[in-house]
Amino acid sequence: MSLPESFIMTSDFPSLRNDGSGTTTVTVPGSMVIGAAGVWQSSSDIVVGSKNASYRSTISSNKASSSRYVTMTLSFDRTGLNGGFPASYTITATISRISATTVRATVYLNNPYGSNLTTAAGTETFTFILTTFISPFA
Amino acid sequence: MDKIILLKTGQVTIGAFGFVDLAVPHGLSFTPLVLGSWTTDSTWVVSYEMNSSPFGSAGFTYQTSTDADNTNLYFHVNNNNASAVTMYYRMYCMEPSNVNVDIAAANTSVNNNFMLNTDNNYTKLFLSGVWTEPSTGGAVVTRTVAHGLGYVPQVAAWFANSAIAVTYPVTYQSPNNTPILIEVDSSLLYMRFQTYSAGSVHYRIYMDELA
């Protein structure tokens, strides 16, 4: 009996092919002080997949649900302190390619206020899981 | 396996700090489930998915998204730069699980001889379906789909928003600002609706483990 290696069929319709996968985390310190209109960001790179590969990701946070959000970009509204009063700000986690086979996971937040913002207490860790695919265009 | 029923490619130029909502007719008798990628490089060495963009100190360099209606696929771009840019897009579509029509072979302008090789690890579709939820009146309503795989599988999802009559892939989520959240764990797919009009989730769960 022959084995099915390199058994090639033609099809009227293409499909997606699994390529690679990778995981990384970005940690956000708690109770940071960010100056007026300032931005904080941190990133981590994953070398994954082939040139031209499409990618999907899930993002999770230890401050949110224990399940994983199926998304490229995830934002949460958080409450910190501005001038001693509760103040809302947004924290965003996102992924993007920076080279043919490297994807960068970035978390950023900006202070929308005209004076210092103290962010929410407690370290927050975002976990990014990435899978890549060879698309029909590759 | 996933069956890709339509492929579209093209390019569009967007002015400095400009935006475009490019309509690409799809010729199908239903609204397909669209996915896509884009680049500013005609050789496609570095490419990006929708809702994924180079990121600088001022935030996203571009904001991109895609969606579809009964007539067109759409490529939406905001150019956050002070110079014009030409973007190249590739969009591909799948058939919703609640559609059952004959479909002509995927267009052959990209590749006219699709080869399936047993050496390759194709994505293996395990479960697909549609869940329609009436308006939740702004409250969060969670629906689940049990997959029972015992590990976290790959998932793709689209949201059909009756308020704006398009179907888009769920690639941006915010518990505070988006009408749908899609989450997954080792036993369930979660659909968290927070809407003011009816909406449907098209989901596809794969046998393939997330990582």
Image (tube, coloured by chain):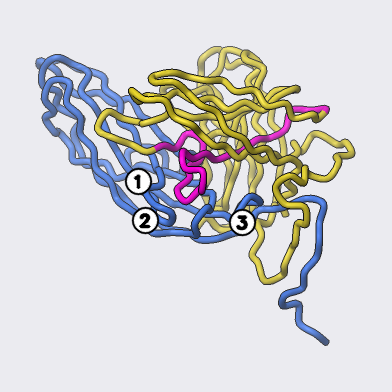
Residue under the image location 68 percent in, 35 percent down: B33
Look at 10% across and 21% down and name the residue there.
Answer: A116
Chain at tag 1: A
Chain identifier of the blue chain: A
Main secondary-structure element of the magenta-colored stretch: loop
Whether callout 1 and callout 3 share a subunit is answered no
**Chain that bears disc 3:** B
For the residue pair B121 and A125, the one nearer the viewer reads as B121
Q: Which comes sooner in the sequence, label 1 or label 2?
A: 2
Are the residues flagged by discs 1 and 2 in contact, CB closer than 8 Å?
Answer: yes
Q: Residue A46's mark?
A: 2
Q: Quadrant of residue B114?
A: bottom right
Q: What is the number of the mark on residue A105? A: 1
> Mark 2 to mark 3: distance in Å?
27 Å
Tell me where the magenta segment starts and ends, as one range: B29-53
Give the camera-side residue of B118 and A51: A51
Q: Give the residue at mark 3.
A: B149
Residue A62, image x, y percentages:
33, 43
Give the color of chain B as drawn. Answer: yellow
Secondary structure, mark 3, is loop
